[in-house]
Image (cartoon, grey):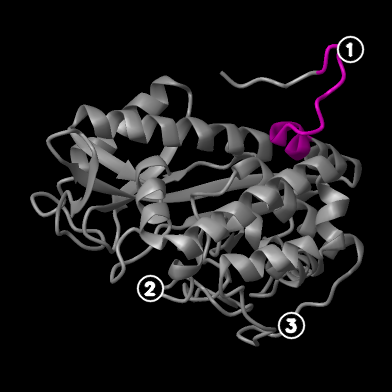
Amino acid sequence: MMCDCLLPDGTLFTGYSRSILRQQVEKAKSLGLTFQIGTEYEFYLFQSDDAGDVTLHPQDSAGYMDVSPLDKGENVRRDICLTLENMGIIPESSHHEHGPGQNEIDFQYAGALKAADNAMSFKTTVHTIANQYGLCASFLPKPLRDESGNGLHINLSIERGGINIFEQQDGQLSLDAQHAIAGILSRIREISLFLNPLPSSYQRLGCWEAPKRINWSFGNRSQLVRIPAAHPGAGRMELRSPDPACNPYLAFALVLAAAMEGITEVTPLQAPLDDSGSLPESLEEAISLAEKSAFIREVLPENVIDAYLAEKKKTAARFEADANAVFQQHLRTI
């Protein structure tokens, strides 16, 4: 069930993350902008033990785009996709990913709020269907030390005056598209805590095509922002640092706000492949950056920021005291 959360007097509860994203969608509308988001979610399927708890034994040993019989997740993904379709959520594609037992399901574009709603329903569906197969699904960003991590790639298109600003002309990005990308790149370090919310998130970055440097390019999958080759009408940018442990409402709200800031402030875009720094090295660094960010305080209510920071500080302290216990907890619950 997706709904708004109201106070007794009928006003919106400011601490509700769905309402926060709605506010950014409405702000975009006031600027004549319409955001469409297509997500790519990666997850692992692990075998269960006799008690039904998750193990670190992957369902299979297949690799990227392998097929049956190596790919043992094919039937699970099919049932997930069919179930989602019955719920009115339309997947675009699915396949086996790089890691053993790792899968990816991609979704058709939708408005930002609908995309976030779909993401919440999707994760619940994956856990439920995996359990029916006697498996455990994990969206933990880095469940296996020496294998590919789980990403949440955010594909973003923006319409202005009925025109997709990411449609290229003679291989060139429009100025609006350049400014939107620049806005995201300029704010990515301080919003990383909301895109990468766990200690495991920072173990993923910099490995197996998960970006570490703040840069962009056409086509290159190792860059933070990628401009994929696209059919006419499907121009977009892909943000590759977020992971599926994030709250999609808060993550999308901050990404939209950064893109809008770039457009309204006419933020210049650095040259392709030029670095402008690196993403945070750890959860502690991400917390420090977010805590100092005036931009985040313009987008999110104070009560949300304070509660979120307090919870992440607890997570960081628990991880420092007993990293394995925190890993096991997140492996079972994320």
Q: Which mark is residue 9?
A: 1
Q: Is mark 1 on a helix, strand or loop?
A: loop
| Tag 2 and tag 1, C-beta contact below 8 Å | no
- Specify whether 220 is left or right of 148: right
Question: What residue is shown at x 46% (from left), y 51% (from top)?
Answer: 40
Residue in front for this viewpoint, 299 or 301: 301
Question: What residue is shown at x 79% (from left), y 18% (from top)?
Answer: 6
| Tag 3 and tag 2, C-beta contact below 8 Å | no
What amino acid is labelled 2 in the image? Trp
Residue under label 2, please give it: 208
Q: Is residue 214 visible?
A: yes
* Mark 2 vs mark 1: in front: 1
Magenta span: helix, strand or loop, mainly?
loop
What amino acid is labelled 1 in the image? Asp
Question: What residue is shown at x 38% (from left), y 55% (from top)?
Answer: 327
Q: Badge 2, how many Cα within 10 Å: few under 14, some, many 20+?
A: some
Q: Distance between the residues labelled 3 and 1?
A: 48 Å
Label located before the other in sequence (3 or 2): 2
- Specify whether 44 is left or right of 68: right
Span highlighted in magenta in the image: 7-22
Q: Distance between the residues labelled 3 and 2?
A: 24 Å
Label located before the other in sequence (3 or 1): 1
Residue under label 3, please give it: 270
